[in-house]
Amino acid sequence: MEDWKTKYSDVIIHSALNLQEGESLSINTNPSTLDFAQQLARIACEITLQQVNVVLVDHGIPKEVIPFHPLENDQLSSGPTGFVLLRLDDTEEREWNPQDAPEEIVRDMALLQKHGILCPPPLNRQVAPWALLAVPGPVWAIKLLGQSASEEDLWQLISSTLKLNCLHPTEAWNDQARLIQQRLDTLNGLQIDHLHFHDEETDLKVGLVQGSHWRGGRQSLPNGRVFIPQFPLERVSALPARNAVTGTVRSSKPIHLLGGIVEGASFIFEQGRIVSHQALKGDHLLDLLFSVDEGASYLGEITLIDEANPLSAFSDFYGHSGFDDNLSTSMVFGGGDALYISESPMFESSQDLQKRTGCNTSDIHAPVKIGTRHLKVTAALTDGSQQIIMENGRFLF
């Protein structure tokens, strides 16, 4: 049996967190992943030569802080040079089938957060390296693979996604980060006016906020410190102009929304706003979603993902944001983010952000997958020319 946890620990410490000597690491964990968190902490403190704190969280409440020190405690001769945060996702203790009524969810910010569609504050600034990562366990294995599945089965399934089956996983992540950066450099080098999404059931034009930039891959702090907040690295994302989305689009995968499922959904946009929608199942959930606030019926983000990525071969839904957000090309109903704005000025409020940039703001952030093996994405450039970005769901660069 492969020692997946040891390999994963190495990838988390060196690829995701990029942990450095002198940094102080805090690991938030639920009881089910406590052993793995402690294994990480023992390794990490020998790298940082600083105390590592494991924070045991039970049902959202911190219960205990467990400190770990390097073997040579006298190495703690100075204070930390910076702080790093890691949260191990709660796939084992999660309420996978919550019974909250959709009508109540849309009126309660805490319930929107519980169901994973509350938009983060759009004016947040990243001040420290962080990561939110999932660890395979028996409950998650059964949810994804069925009642007879084991934790080992799940490790086997996602080992390629986490690059644990590579001879040198950290180098494989470096290669993937370089690929995503190449795509970002290419897209940011184009003067794109709007994107055109087209396949048998989609004909959608999405204008982009001028002065914004494509984001994805490794994240970077103002001091140049890099890290990977979630695995895997597949997506590159842009900020749509609020009033510049027109056409029709159909969802390519079921939408897990407000405790239910929407299937076969199609949407019509005019001047950025949803003017019509219908679904084979769960259409009323879309009505509720768009009732949250005015911005809920506009787009806040557009994401391109190569349809050949390993996640898409196994499931339409993983229940972990890092995996689900990297499944397929998608559009996001709801809020935008100031981090997309190049040389971002200080904004007074989310309303100020929307007014000055033309992006959308909302209390929600609800992704809808639109990628298919037939999708073509063309960039219409400001000089009147066009450039194909994706063909048959695959990047051309």
Image (cartoon, grey):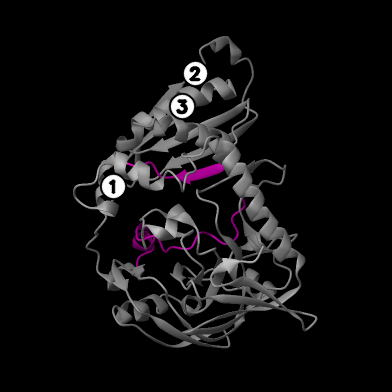
* Residue 40 picture location, percent across and down: 45, 29
Between discs 3 and 1, the one toward the N terminus: 3
Between discs 2 and 3, the one toward the N terminus: 3
Give the image quarter of residue 207: bottom right
Which kind of residue does numbered mark 3 sit on? Ala
Q: Is residue 369 above or below residue 298?
A: above
Query: In this picture, which residue range is highlighted in magenta?
Result: 107-136
- Local secondary structure at mark 1: helix
The residue pinned by badge 1 equals 141
Which kind of residue does numbered mark 1 sit on? Ala
Q: How many residues crowd mark 1 within 10 Å: few (<14), some (14–19), many (20+)?
A: many
- Local secondary structure at mark 2: loop
Between discs 2 and 1, the one toward the N terminus: 2
The residue pinned by badge 2 equals 69
Residue 128 in view (yes/no): no
Total numbered labels placed on residues in the image: 3
The residue pinned by badge 3 equals 41
- Which tag is nearer the camera, tag 2 or tag 3? 3
> Distance of mark 2 from mark 1, alpha carbons?
33 Å
- Local secondary structure at mark 3: helix
The circle drawn on residue 360 is none
Residue 198 in view (yes/no): yes
